[in-house]
Amino acid sequence: MESFMPSLAMILTQLGFAGLNVVSKVAMNKGMNPFVMVTYRQVVATLSTAPMAYFMERKTKTKLTWSILFQIFLCSLFGATLNQSLYFAGLKFVSPTIACALNNLLPAVTFIIAVPFRMETIGVRSKAGLAKVVGTVICVGGAMLMTFYKGPHINMWSSGIRWDIDYETSSKETTTTDNNRPTDFIIGSVMVVASCFAWAIWFILQARMSRTFSAPYTSTSMLCFVAAVQCAVMTVCMERNPSAWALGWNVRLLAVVYTGLVGSGMAFCVMSWCIQRRGPLFVSMFSPLLLIIVAFFGWALFDEKLHLGR
């Protein structure tokens, strides 16, 4: 049973990420600045993971060195600040389904980056190596197909459920993106793809750091704290309107709490633990599952129209 725990943990993480995509899209459709949301997300994640790190790893004998602190800084920069900022900025221009489809590049990008660091080998003469190469080609080809090809509409029955809080805004935005401003779709897609590269780099950095600092809760808490500072500085420079930081008892607060607790706090702890046991490529391989879950949520909750391609 223990051997299946990393797989089960990653499936639950993808379910959490699916909810993150939906809730975040709703909040941004209601006018929330994506960079403000990312900053709040890191703050909530820090507050939620710090107690766990203290009580579960206070007796851990791992030692913090300047080298470890620098690695945590880089992990924060690529795994949280750049990854999440680029992803949410891109999500503002594309639907959650498209963003998750482009995330299918993640295993391919991770594999390509891992090879020079000797964390993965190509080995095309072996079945495992050949499968990795073929999988990489399929990931890249599928992501490109989703970006440039819009096929016929897939006729599906209505689920009978609709989340009215997002439907009208989402429909108008989709119409604008598809018909009036097609460049928005390209910009959003490029941002999501760039976030994949940042995330893949984090996988590699986290795998290397876990060899010398095997305290996933502590490293996650410190990562989120440093990322909160990085995101706050970046957001203050980009968003000068104080009202953009306002929260109330609405979907903005829900998005901040959910993304912080589930999308960063829980997810980073689980992924760090899985990377330590199975490696970076194992964790990235579960990203295609996210597309299926989000596509289902989009159809069931928002009556999103599905097409072959984008």
Image: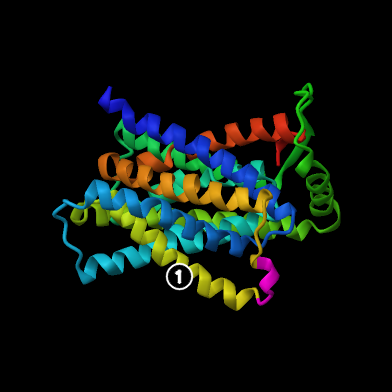
Q: Is residue 285 left or right of residue 32?
A: left
Q: Is residue 284 left or right of residue 95?
A: left
Picture quadrant of residue 96:
top right
Residue that appears at 65% across and 53% down: 252
Picture quadrant of residue 69:
bottom left
Tell me the kind of residue under disc 1: Val
Q: Residue furthest left?
A: 61
Above or below: residue 299 compared with residue 254: above
**Main secondary structure along the magenta-highlighted residues:** helix
Residue 242 magenta-drawn?
yes
Residue picked out by circle 1: 229
Residue that appears at 35% across and 55% down: 50
> Where residue 250 appears, x then y in whole percent?
69, 50
Above or below: residue 104 compared with residue 45: above
Q: Nearer the viewer, residue 59 or 283?
A: 59
Mark 1 residue element: helix
> Where residue 198 appears, x then y in whole percent?
46, 59
> Where residue 134 appears, x then y in whole percent?
44, 37
Picture quadrant of residue 226:
bottom left
The residue segment tinted magenta is 240-244
In which quadrant will I find the N terminus? top left
Residue that appears at 60% across and 64% down: 36
Q: Residues within 10 Å of mark 1 (few under 14, many from 20)?
A: some
In which quadrant will I find the C terminus? top right
Q: Is residue 110 left or right of residue 255?
A: left
Does residue 73 appear in this view? yes
Q: How many marks?
A: 1
Q: Nearer the viewer, residue 90 or 17?
A: 17
